[in-house]
Image (spheres, rainbow, N blue to C red):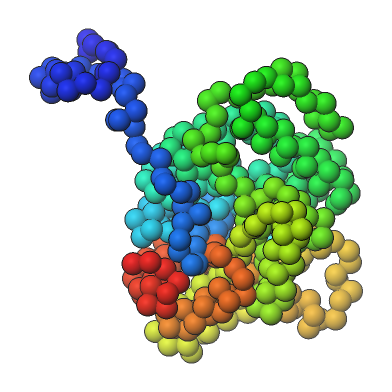
Amino acid sequence: MRMIRVFDGTSAALNSIQRRSECWVTTSPAFLPEAPAVAPLRNDNALKLGVFAMNCKGGTTLTKVESGRIVPTWPQQLAIARAADAAGWEFLLPLARWRGIGGDTDPNSAQFEVFSWAAGITAATERIQVLATAHVPLFEPLVAAKQAATIDHIGHGRFGLNVVSGWNAPEMAMFGKANPPHDERYRIAEEWITLIERLWTENDQFDFDGEFFQAKNAYLAPRPVQQPRPVIVQAGSSPTGMDFAARHADFGFQVHPDLGKLRDMNTNLRKRAEQQGREIGVLTVGTVVCADTEAEAKRYFEHCVDELGDFAAAQNLIDELIGGDNRSWPREQFRAMARGMIAGWGGLQLVGTPEQIVDRLVEVKRSGADGVALSWVDYESGIAQFNEQVLPLLVEAGLRQS
């Protein structure tokens, strides 16, 4: 039977370990990983790079293409995460889904739960920031705060929290929960994140008596490694959502396929943060199709979207996101929006040669974005190609450090 002893970090104890077959538990901070000087999302790269929605079947694209698709499987998740980590990417951002979108392929119908996924991925990587996307109605704030702190310790300061006020009525119904009106959801989220932030930062026990949440003698230990708290991301684009982000988030997550409109959204968000006496960064989302020629990239994009796009799933997603009777829209208006959803949840479309994609990302930076969460039809081959062909050009363009 192997002995278990506590290692105090001394050289004598280390020499003893080398001489005997014993299992040791270290208590010495010197033998723990060093906390990063700054969280990866707060580093000096002009354009942060992330991977989006890799934890869900199909990722962000709604297509009938089968080759290389997200299943998901754990080996596939590890391969993608480690490829981003080894190349110095800043973050991994999961999509919080609990059921599929329907249609012919039912995208997102299989998914890894975000907090346990983040814990596993964090333990398997070294440098990258791993976020969990939390629907406020589904996570008690004390539980979410504890989960976040635990994962932050697993990665020694690499956790991030993406706060979603809740929007998907069919998913809420799975939990027996109503989907409150839009502005009320943000009132609930305001109390939720306020309680979590107090748990992360206060030493003493406290009582919390809100309209939606109450806590008696609340406290948290250990607190997160990141101080004063982990990075917070929030994706609201309505005035109410932007105001929430301006008060609480380090990064707003703004999505639009048109760079001009994205620039206006980014400017609006930053102004709202300034009015709160804060600074805020901006992240956006884009789908990559890269090829040796522009024509080849466009052909593959059109094959995935126009020829094999799951328009029934896109219809359902539009219903969920926008609501209303969009079936009465003019055909071309619906098709244009559906194509954007099929291509990648209505985000930027980065289609072309490596040089063209870099030019596009330069424009993304000029729009006021600090980072972009990327997705592909085939994530594994896509990120490998991006690291080999696009990343060096981003360094040359001054968007990334070598």
Q: Is residue 199 above or below residue 13?
A: below
Please name the residue shown 41% across and 61% down the image.
380
Residue 62: x, y in percent?
A: 62, 66
Which quadrant of the figure has residue 272? bottom right
Q: Is residue 94 left or right of residue 395?
A: right
Looking at the figure, which quarter contains the C terminus?
A: bottom left
Does any portion of residue 11 appear in the rendered image? yes
- The front one of 134 and 316 is 134
Please name the residue shown 40% across and 40% down the image.
35
Residue 357: x, y in percent?
A: 48, 79
Please name the residue shown 42% across and 65% down the image.
383
Does any portion of residue 117 appear in the rendered image? no
Q: Is residue 388 left or right of residue 333?
A: left
Which quadrant of the figure has residue 315? bottom right
Residue 43: x, y in percent?
A: 46, 56
Q: Is residue 360 left or right of residue 328?
A: left
- The front one of 96 and 304 is 96
Count all numbered tags in the image, as a single digit.
Answer: 0
Q: Is residue 43 above or below residue 339?
A: above
- The front one of 72 and 28 is 28
Residue 123: x, y in percent?
A: 41, 39
**Residue located farthest toward the front when viewing the structure as drawn:** 277
- The front one of 134 and 248 is 248
Looking at the figure, which quarter contains the N terminus?
A: top left
Please name the residue shown 38% across and 66% down the image.
401
